[in-house]
Amino acid sequence: MHAAVLHDFGGTPRFAEFPEPEPGEGEALVRVTAAALTPLARWVASDRDFSRGREVPFVCGTEGIGRLEDGTRVSFGVTRPPFGTMAEFAIAPTRLCTPIPDEVDDVTAAAMMNPGLSAWSALSWGAKLRPGETVLVLGGTGVAGKTAIQIAKLLGAGRVVAAGRNERVLTTLGEYGADLTVSLDQTEESLADAFREAAGQSGYDVVLDYLWGRPAQVLLDALPRRFMVTSEIRYLQLGSSAGTEITLRANALRRTGVTMGAGAPPPIDFLRDLQSTVLGHAASGVVRVDTETVPLADVAAAWRRDVPGRRFVVIP
């Protein structure tokens, strides 16, 4: 079969021949129709330590849309190494092959699965978002951030503040539901002031952080310190595209009311039901994602490109 094959960690996958997978017990063979080029796929391919036990060569891609042998359209992921989703065929645990609604097309489903499920489960399961609360999205100009803005509004957020670096995309975020935007492209002192101003009198109730690094550092240092903490800030750490480390001062936790983590993972049944909900809203246009389709043969060129706020979807 043809596939996007990685031969060196940190390199670019190439369109090449690769042995077709043979499903084992509890696995299904999937004819792939669409596979999103996600940050996670790039991350797994970037370094041996991040590769989840893979050895090169292997097929790139961590999730996709396809058809089972009986014709059922499904979303799937968690493929067994050395196989991935950017190929003509893939294998996946049968229990994790979830039928998708007829009304959503394969490209939209592939593009929406990762950011949609991540944001919705973080807000509803992890942060327990309540109607009227204020949400800050760090990384609002990326695909995940733009999706999170829309879902936060859909779930009843009173205000959504979006912070990002790309000025062109920042100007469009009002169309996705952002009430305020904060440019990350400024000095730390100015950025801290911008975070405080955007918080207003009520402050932030929920933070979805897709960045970590400098933006998280500045935000946590900018939060007001109180001797008696009377409110809680639920801080969900979901990504690290701006850096993997920060200096976290003790009083950033003790005196701000911040509770921090990724949240306990929701159960599989919750995610199955949530998938239908997310894809239903995507099919109706209530939650949208900007996509660009890429033939599998052109995967190397797409891998080297980066268009903020747009998700590439590979078509075998």
Image (cartoon, rainbow, N blue to C red):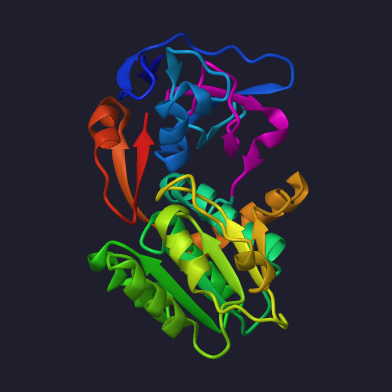
Quarter the C terminus occupies: top left
Residue 261 appearing in the image: yes
* Left or right: 109, with 233 as reference point: left
Residue 226 screen position, x and y as percent: 65, 81
Q: Is residue 261 above or below residue 193?
A: above
Report the side of 272 relative to 212 (left or right).
right
Residue 126 position in % (x across, y down): 69, 60
Q: Position of residue 293 (x, y in %)?
A: 31, 43
Name the residue located 77 percent from the left edge and 48 percent from the top edge. 267
Residue 83 among those drawn in magenta? yes
Q: State which quadrant residue 177 falls in.
A: bottom left
Which residue lies most toward the bottom here? 201
| Residue 16, above or below 186 | above
- The foreground one among 38 and 231 is 231
- In the image, what residue occupies the spot 69% across and 50% down? 271
Q: Is residue 98 magenta?
A: yes
The magenta segment: 71-100
**Residue at figure coordinates x 58%, y 32% from the top left:** 71
Q: Residue at x 47, y 48 (%)?
A: 240
